[in-house]
Amino acid sequence: MSLMNNPSYSLRELLESDAVWIERAAEDVEIQKWTANGGQQVKERQAWAILKDTEPVGVISLHSVDLLTSVADVGYWVAPWGRRQGAAKAALGLVESELTQMHGVKSIQLRIMEGNHASIALATSLGYELVSAGTCSCGSQGVVPAVIYEKKL
């Protein structure tokens, strides 16, 4: 199998220069539909660029860690040019590995806007289980109904 069919994924801290490709990605209707503020609100969170080889293709972020429940809340999005190639799956795996090292974190939750079938399919394929309904600040509509998937670490 050639490297073209098996890209290498990694994460790195977001840089000021990432604003250019993030703005371009935020023009995508899918990102606007499923992510808060069109994917552009990443400054307040611990967030990383998802790299396919050396090209940024998305963002994954740690929204919060609740030490009372030992749950980390993680979110992600992938730009149109990086979709359906394993970027989100790889990024979640990398973040899961890091969170297993974080004292007090015993599980990861993904808050997925109702109707986001691609993210729901990804979550279930990675062993996340539906634990409840709730809300998220997903999409351009503000706070919306969501499904919450969780994976024990």
Image (cartoon, rainbow, N blue to C red):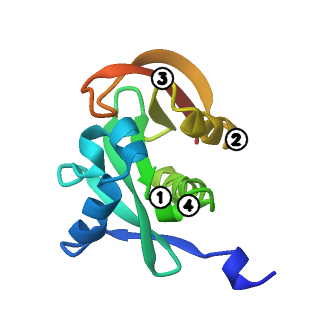
Label 4 is placed on what type of residue? Answer: Ala
Q: Earlier in the sequence, mark 1 or mark 3?
A: 1
Q: Nearer the viewer, mark 1 or mark 3?
A: 1
| Residue 1 shows up from this direction | yes
Query: Residue 124 got which mark?
Result: none
Which x, y percent locates residue 71?
43, 34
Mark toward the start of the polypeptide (4 vs 2): 4
Side of 151 relative to 42 (left or right): right
How many neighbours does mark 1 have within 10 angstroms: few (below 14), some (14-19), or many (20 or more)?
some
Q: On the rendered structure, is 121 left or right of 73?
A: right
Q: Position of residue 36 (x, y in %)?
A: 28, 39
Q: Which mark is residue 87?
A: 4
Q: Which mark is residue 80?
A: 1
Closest to the camera, between mark 2 and mark 3, is 3
Neighbour class for label 3 at 10 Å: few (<14), some, many (≥20)? Answer: some
Q: Which residue is mark 3?
A: 114
The earlier-in-sequence mark between 2 and 3 is: 3
Identify the residue shown where x is 29% and y is 30%.
Answer: 137
Specify the amino acid type for callout 2. Ser
Q: Secondary structure at mark 3?
A: loop
Mark 2 lies on residue:
125
